Image (cartoon, grey):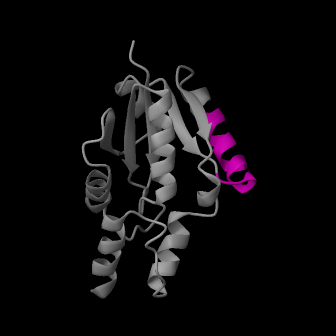
Amino acid sequence: MIRRAIYPGSFDPVTNGHLDVIDRARKLFDEVIVAVAHNDQKQPLFSLEERLQLLRDTLGNLDHVEIAPLDGLLVDFAVARQATAVIRGLRAVSDFEFEFQMALMNRKLEATVETIFLMPKEEYTYLSSRIVKEIARLGGNIAEFVPPRVAEAFRSKLAK
């Protein structure tokens, strides 16, 4: 049986912290599906298609990693894709309460899907997409926080 996990997120934009979690997940699972969520509650800087493309450009043809759009309930997506786990990154204690509630709710909705929490390298614990967007909007250099293709996309997007 293939051990398959879903790593969901908005990835607006994908950061080096996200890439670190993907790399860690690849060591634990045979396949990792990076699921890019459409969230009506958020106003993304990049469209869903742009976020999917930035991940494809960044990850290339990385073995055993698939990039897919996610719409609807995460547990339904996991069951449909025959995944047994959801990967969530935890940077700090402040992330834990929300993530813990989500993990319990997902377990209630679908008991066959486990949530696995992975911590990124210490150098990424302060990093979030929200912070990266704020730095970029204020003209700061984001090159050390995101892959080169993402930094380029920011320059293009903010120049408009």
The image quadrant where one finds the C terminus is bottom left
As rendered, which of 119 and 85 lies closer to the eye?
119
Q: Residue at x 30, y 65 (%)?
A: 149
Among the 4 quarters of the image, the one containing residue 58: bottom left
Q: Is residue 101 magenta?
A: yes
Q: Is residue 100 magenta?
A: yes
Q: Residue at x 55, y 63 (%)?
A: 128
As rendered, which of 48 and 15 lies closer to the eye?
15
With respect to residue 13, does 120 lie above or below? Answer: above
Count of all numbered marks drawn on residues in the image? 0
Left or right of 68? Residue 32 is: right
With respect to residue 24, does 129 lie above or below? Answer: below
Picture coordinates of residue 65, whole percent (x, y): 33, 37
Among the 4 quarters of the image, the one containing residue 3: top left
Does the image show residue 46? no
Does the image show residue 54? yes
Left or right of 57? Residue 93 is: right
Q: Residue at x 72, y 48 (%)?
A: 97
As rendered, which of 73 and 98 lies closer to the eye?
98
As rendered, which of 90 and 16 lies closer to the eye?
16
Task: State the predominant SS element of the stretch in magenta.
Answer: helix
Left or right of 12? Residue 66 is: left
Left or right of 86? Residue 1 is: left
Picture coordinates of residue 130, whole percent (x, y): 53, 69
Magenta residues, start to end? 91-105
Among the 4 quarters of the image, the one containing residue 33: top left
Picture coordinates of residue 137, whole percent (x, y): 45, 83
With respect to residue 84, does 20 lie above or below? Answer: below
Picture coordinates of residue 1, whole percent (x, y): 39, 12
